[in-house]
Image (cartoon, rainbow, N blue to C red):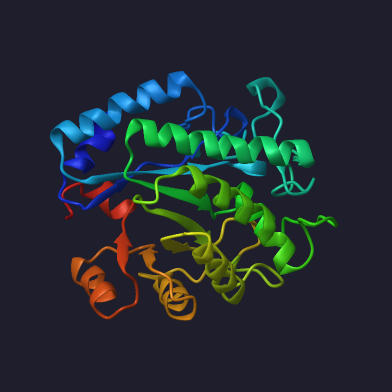
Amino acid sequence: LMHLGQFAISGVGLVITEAAAVEARGRITRDCLGLWNDDNEAALDRVIAFCRQHGGAKLGIQLAHAGRKASTRKPWEGRNSLAEHEGPWETVSSSANPHTHGWHTPKSMDAGELATVKQAFVDAALRSERIGFDLIEVHGAHGYLLHEFLSPVANTRTDAYGGGLENRMRYPLEVFAAMREVWPESKPMGLRVSTTDWIAGGWHPEEAVEFARHLKALGCDYICASSGGVSEEQKIELGEGYQVRFAEQIRRDADMMTMAVGMIYDPHHAERIVTTGQADMVALARGLLFDPHWA
């Protein structure tokens, strides 16, 4: 209540919640935000009503499924998979490949599970509309479930959902299309994508551009251009604004509105990103956590 409430009155234009799992097994940790049942909906409805009462910001929700990166410890406990004595739950993914050595092996999703999870995303979108969110951002990045279909690092399927780019994009596009169908046309829906895996042979920016073109045809309003997360072997070139070029590339090559994110700390830098056409929006996480009055 206070966490999101402070941002609603902070002067920002839009507040997006942290990733909200669309089913219980889609949580990263046991304590992550979720929106898969009536109790979740009632609790979040109270928070959003509070934000609206006191603040003027638009309010969005990020809907997600952690896939093979679910059932883990909290960040300050080490982020690793839950051990047997810690009450782990079964995880699912595009393929039965663990995230890294020592992690649990996920179940490769069959046709029934593909349909179940897609419906969970749809149901969460319907709940988001009942709560009154202004925007949905679908989480397709950082090595979580939808990214696990997109990336050849995680996806080794041999059916219609694996192999070439068209097949690897198929399930995320099906999920987005089903969500867009039930979300009001007057409200924006975007998607966060990892533009590159930062690993040889992985998902790369040109594929992300093609994915964005397909999403645009389905009614996607913007892309939040992030990166990485699918492999512990990634070699990230960190630095202030290190992902802005990905937002610029997708904006230019896919003719899509984009949101730039990642180590953007200086207001003048943020303003320059927008005024020079590198991106249409700038999102901050750590910057606002460090200083809720940043705006």
Which image quadrant for residue 223? Answer: bottom left
**x, y (%) of residue 278?**
34, 77
Nearest the camera: 15 or 82? 15
Screen quadrant of the C terminus = bottom left
Q: Is residue 238 above or below residue 137?
A: below
Nearest the camera: 84 or 185? 185
Nearest the camera: 191 or 70? 191
**x, y (%) of residue 259?**
37, 64
Q: Is residue 13 above or below residue 110?
A: below
Q: Is residue 227 visible?
A: no
- Total label count? 0
Q: Residue at x 85, y 57 (%)?
A: 158
Q: Is residue 198 above or below residue 104?
A: below
**x, y (%) of residue 139?**
51, 50
Q: Residue at x 74, y 48 (%)?
A: 101
**197 lies left or right of 222:** right
Nearest the camera: 19 or 265? 19
Q: Residue furthest right?
A: 158
Q: Residue at x 29, y 28 (%)?
A: 47
**178 lies left or right of 287:** right
Which image quadrant for residue 257? Answer: bottom left
Q: Is residue 201 visible?
A: yes
**x, y (%) of residue 213?**
54, 70
Screen quadrant of the N terminus = top left
**6 lies left or right of 155:** left
